[in-house]
Image (cartoon, rainbow, N blue to C red):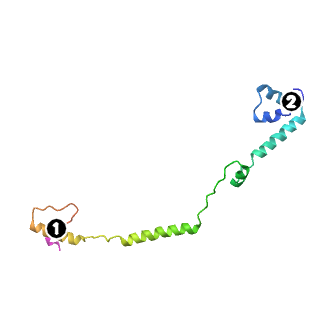
Amino acid sequence: MTGHVGELASAYLDGETTAEESAKVVAHVAECASCRDELADLHAARSALRGLPVLEMPVSVMVDMGLVPDVVPLRRRPIAWVAAAAASVAIFIGGATLAAPETVGIPLDDVSSQYEQQVRIDPGLTPPVGVVTEPEGAQ
Protein backbone atom coordinates (compact mmCIF):
# COMPACT_ATOMS: atom_id res chain seq x y z
CA MET A 1 0.00 0.00 0.00
CA THR A 2 1.47 3.32 -1.00
CA GLY A 3 1.12 6.14 1.51
CA HIS A 4 -0.59 5.95 4.86
CA VAL A 5 -4.02 4.60 5.74
CA GLY A 6 -5.70 8.04 5.89
CA GLU A 7 -9.43 8.01 5.14
CA LEU A 8 -9.50 4.22 4.87
CA ALA A 9 -9.03 4.03 8.65
CA SER A 10 -12.57 5.23 9.35
CA ALA A 11 -14.08 3.05 6.63
CA TYR A 12 -12.09 0.08 7.97
CA LEU A 13 -13.42 0.62 11.52
CA ASP A 14 -16.98 0.87 10.14
CA GLY A 15 -16.55 -2.38 8.21
CA GLU A 16 -17.11 -0.58 4.91
CA THR A 17 -13.91 -1.64 3.16
CA THR A 18 -13.65 -4.48 0.69
CA ALA A 19 -11.69 -7.59 1.59
CA GLU A 20 -8.74 -6.34 -0.49
CA GLU A 21 -8.76 -2.89 1.16
CA SER A 22 -9.01 -4.46 4.63
CA ALA A 23 -6.03 -6.68 3.91
CA LYS A 24 -4.00 -3.63 2.75
CA VAL A 25 -4.93 -1.68 5.92
CA VAL A 26 -3.95 -4.59 8.19
CA ALA A 27 -0.65 -5.08 6.36
CA HIS A 28 0.21 -1.36 6.46
CA VAL A 29 -0.74 -0.94 10.14
CA ALA A 30 1.48 -3.90 11.02
CA GLU A 31 4.49 -2.00 9.56
CA CYS A 32 3.62 1.69 10.22
CA ALA A 33 3.61 2.80 13.88
CA SER A 34 2.07 6.23 13.15
CA CYS A 35 -0.90 4.69 11.25
CA ARG A 36 -1.28 2.09 14.03
CA ASP A 37 -1.44 4.92 16.61
CA GLU A 38 -3.86 6.89 14.41
CA LEU A 39 -6.12 3.85 14.04
CA ALA A 40 -6.02 3.19 17.80
CA ASP A 41 -6.83 6.86 18.59
CA LEU A 42 -9.68 6.88 16.08
CA HIS A 43 -11.08 3.65 17.56
CA ALA A 44 -10.87 5.06 21.12
CA ALA A 45 -12.60 8.32 20.09
CA ARG A 46 -15.40 6.46 18.31
CA SER A 47 -15.91 4.16 21.31
CA ALA A 48 -16.07 7.16 23.65
CA LEU A 49 -18.65 8.88 21.45
CA ARG A 50 -20.80 5.75 21.18
CA GLY A 51 -20.72 5.41 24.97
CA LEU A 52 -22.33 8.82 25.51
CA PRO A 53 -26.03 8.90 26.43
CA VAL A 54 -28.52 9.86 23.75
CA LEU A 55 -30.28 13.09 24.64
CA GLU A 56 -33.58 14.20 23.20
CA MET A 57 -33.77 17.62 21.68
CA PRO A 58 -36.34 19.91 23.34
CA VAL A 59 -39.43 20.54 21.22
CA SER A 60 -38.88 24.30 21.39
CA VAL A 61 -35.45 23.93 19.76
CA MET A 62 -36.88 21.73 17.02
CA VAL A 63 -39.62 24.31 16.36
CA ASP A 64 -37.04 27.11 16.25
CA MET A 65 -34.96 25.15 13.75
CA GLY A 66 -38.03 24.45 11.61
CA LEU A 67 -37.76 20.68 12.03
CA VAL A 68 -41.35 20.35 13.24
CA PRO A 69 -44.37 22.62 12.88
CA ASP A 70 -45.48 24.74 15.80
CA VAL A 71 -46.69 22.39 18.48
CA VAL A 72 -49.14 23.26 21.19
CA PRO A 73 -47.77 21.49 24.24
CA LEU A 74 -50.18 19.59 26.43
CA ARG A 75 -50.60 21.20 29.80
CA ARG A 76 -50.49 19.02 32.81
CA ARG A 77 -53.57 19.20 34.92
CA PRO A 78 -52.96 20.78 38.27
CA ILE A 79 -53.30 18.48 41.26
CA ALA A 80 -56.26 20.55 42.47
CA TRP A 81 -58.32 19.47 39.45
CA VAL A 82 -57.51 15.83 40.02
CA ALA A 83 -58.44 16.12 43.70
CA ALA A 84 -61.69 17.89 42.82
CA ALA A 85 -62.60 15.17 40.34
CA ALA A 86 -61.91 12.45 42.92
CA ALA A 87 -64.01 14.28 45.51
CA SER A 88 -66.88 14.62 43.03
CA VAL A 89 -66.84 10.90 42.32
CA ALA A 90 -66.80 10.11 46.05
CA ILE A 91 -69.77 12.44 46.68
CA PHE A 92 -71.70 10.90 43.79
CA ILE A 93 -71.12 7.36 45.07
CA GLY A 94 -72.06 8.38 48.62
CA GLY A 95 -75.26 10.06 47.43
CA ALA A 96 -76.21 7.08 45.29
CA THR A 97 -75.65 4.77 48.25
CA LEU A 98 -77.85 6.89 50.53
CA ALA A 99 -80.60 7.29 47.92
CA ALA A 100 -80.78 3.56 47.15
CA PRO A 101 -83.84 1.82 48.57
CA GLU A 102 -83.34 -0.45 51.53
CA THR A 103 -83.41 -4.13 50.80
CA VAL A 104 -86.46 -5.90 52.11
CA GLY A 105 -85.60 -9.10 53.86
CA ILE A 106 -87.86 -11.64 55.45
CA PRO A 107 -86.41 -13.35 58.52
CA LEU A 108 -86.00 -17.09 58.22
CA ASP A 109 -88.30 -17.68 61.22
CA ASP A 110 -91.14 -15.88 59.44
CA VAL A 111 -90.64 -17.94 56.28
CA SER A 112 -90.60 -21.15 58.30
CA SER A 113 -93.76 -20.26 60.23
CA GLN A 114 -95.57 -19.28 57.00
CA TYR A 115 -94.58 -22.59 55.44
CA GLU A 116 -95.79 -24.52 58.50
CA GLN A 117 -99.17 -22.82 58.23
CA GLN A 118 -99.42 -23.74 54.54
CA VAL A 119 -98.50 -27.35 55.28
CA ARG A 120 -101.30 -27.57 57.88
CA ILE A 121 -103.76 -26.29 55.30
CA ASP A 122 -102.48 -28.42 52.40
CA PRO A 123 -100.74 -31.61 53.59
CA GLY A 124 -99.65 -32.46 50.00
CA LEU A 125 -97.34 -29.43 49.86
CA THR A 126 -93.71 -30.43 49.54
CA PRO A 127 -91.05 -28.30 51.18
CA PRO A 128 -89.06 -26.08 48.84
CA VAL A 129 -85.37 -26.87 48.48
CA GLY A 130 -83.32 -25.15 51.14
CA VAL A 131 -86.10 -24.69 53.72
CA VAL A 132 -85.40 -26.61 56.90
CA THR A 133 -88.41 -27.72 58.86
CA GLU A 134 -88.17 -28.83 62.42
CA PRO A 135 -90.20 -31.72 63.78
CA GLU A 136 -93.31 -30.63 65.67
CA GLY A 137 -92.19 -31.74 69.13
CA ALA A 138 -88.66 -30.21 68.90
CA GLN A 139 -89.52 -26.80 70.33
Which amino acid type corresponds to the residue marked 2 in the rendered image?
His
Name the side, left or right, on which 58 lies relative to 21: left
Image quadrant in which you'd find residue 22: top right
Image location of residue 54, percent across then percent down: 71, 49
Image quadrant in which you'd find residue 107: bottom left
Residue, disc 1: 115
Image location of residue 27, percent across then percent down: 84, 28
Mark seen at residue 28 = 2
* Element marked by disc 2: helix
Image location of residue 29, percent across then percent down: 86, 32
Name the side, left or right, on which 85 lies relative to 128: right
Of the two numbered discs 1 and 2 on the same chain, state the one appearing first in sequence. Answer: 2
**Residue at the image position 76 percent from the left and 35 percent from the top:** 14
Numbered-mark total: 2
Mark seen at residue 107 = none
**Residue at the image position 79 percent from the left and 42 percent from the top:** 46
Magenta-tinted stretch = 135-139
* Element marked by disc 1: helix
Image quadrant in which you'd find residue 41: top right
In the image, farthest residue toward the top? 20
Q: Main secondary structure of the magenta part?
A: helix
